[in-house]
Image (cartoon, rainbow, N blue to C red):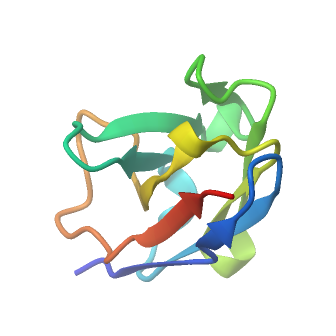
Amino acid sequence: QVQIVESGGGLVQPGGSLRLSCAVSGKFFSIYAMGWHRQAPGKQRELVASIFSGGSAGTTNYADSVKGRFTISRDDAKNTVYLEMNSLKPEDTAVYYCNRPGPNYFGSWGQGTQVTVSS
């Protein structure tokens, strides 16, 4: 059973930065593409960033809404995925989760980490 633990969220002013971390238990982490998803109140969960594995390791994709501001990275030796978020906007406020990018996901999701962008 994979366990996922996200951390690093908090309250930040518009224009600020945060770095999220996601620790994933279990073997074979390095073979999976990973993604950061977010869900704002009253909205559907959306994939905001993904990073590939294996031969395409390092290849990243971003939602248009975060392109140029967010950077996803991974450390396979630590089974950890990161999301560096800069120039944060109020519309980035959401609970952030990590999992596979989809359509297949790890069976269990973590508790997420709350990001609130407000002055």
Q: Position of residue 75 (x, y in %)?
A: 74, 66
Q: Residue at x 59, y 23 (%)?
A: 65
Camera-nearest residue between 2 and 91: 91
- On the rendered image, what quadrant is the N terminus found in? bottom left
Q: Residue at x 52, y 38 (%)?
A: 91
Q: Position of residue 6 (x, y in %)?
A: 49, 75
Residue 44 appears left or right of 5? left
Using the rendered image of the protein, determine whether residue 75 is visible from the camera's viewpoint.
no
Image quadrant where residue 67 sits: top right
- On the rendered image, what quadrant is the C terminus found in? bottom right
Camera-nearest residue between 77 and 72: 72
Q: Residue at x 49, y 46 (%)?
A: 35
Using the rendered image of the protein, determine whether residue 18 is visible from the camera's viewpoint.
yes
Camera-nearest residue between 57 and 114: 114
Residue 27 appears left or right of 71? left
Q: Position of residue 69 (x, y in %)?
A: 78, 35
Image quadrant where residue 19 sits: bottom right
> In the displayed structure, would residue 85 be above or below residue 13?
above
Q: Position of residue 60 (x, y in %)?
A: 68, 31
Residue 52 appears left or right of 3? right
Q: Residue at x 40, y 40 (%)?
A: 101
Image quadrant where residue 71 sits: top right
> In the displayed structure, would residue 16 be above or below residue 109?
above
